[in-house]
Amino acid sequence: MCKACSLRNVEYKCRVNLQNKIKITENDRIVICLSGGMSSICLTNVLAELRKKFQKHLLFKSIEVVHVDLSVLSENQ
């Protein structure tokens, strides 16, 4: 699968899960806990792209990003 097809597939799965499993609506705000790792940055990018692509059919109201320093969590354990 090419890079563009792979990205479209991830965006599609994310949108379907947001709408059908999580039941998100256009008035909801999404809060993302971002550690700075590849997976959290990827999630943030996918949600931002979905919001841009579906501006006319608002998928959700906004995205809020909160940074979580995982080194602080591991020090306390």
Image: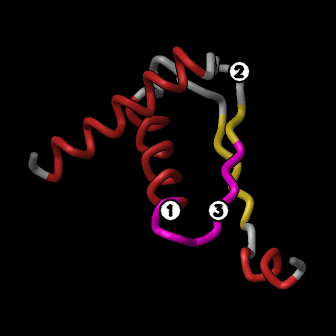
Q: Nearer the viewer, mark 3 or mark 2?
A: 3
Q: Position of residue 7 (x, y in %)?
A: 26, 45
Q: Where does label 1 land, which residue?
A: 41
Provide the residue span drawn in magenta. Answer: 31-39
Q: Earlier in the sequence, mark 1 or mark 3?
A: 3
What residue would you read off at disc 3?
A: 34
Looking at the rendered image, the disc whose residue lies closer to the viewer, 1 or 2, is 1
Which residue is more in the foreground, 71 or 48? 71
- Left or right, residue 74 beside residue 63: right
For label 2, the crowd category at 10 Å Cα-Cα, with few meaning under 14, some 14 to 19 and many 20 or more, is: few
| Amino acid bearing label 2 | Asn
Residue 72, above or below 27: below
- In front of the other: 50 or 7: 7
- Circle 3 crowding by C-alpha within 10 Å: few under 14, some 14–19, many from 20: some
Image coordinates for residue 4, horizontal then vertical, percent: 17, 47
Q: Amino acid at mark 3?
A: Leu
Labels 1 and 3 touching (C-beta < 8 A): yes
**Residue at image x 49%, y 45%?**
48
User: Residue at image x 36%, y 36%?
Assistant: 11
Q: Is residue 33 magenta?
A: yes
Give the mark nearest the N terminus, 3 or 2: 2
| In magenta stretch: residue 74 | no
Mark 1 or mark 2, earlier in chain: 2
Marking on residue 27: 2
Q: Is residue 39 left or right of residue 61?
A: left
**Quarter-of-image position of residue 71:** bottom right
Q: Is residue 53 left or right of residue 33?
A: left
Q: Position of residue 20 (x, y in %)?
A: 52, 14
Kind of element beneath mark 1? helix
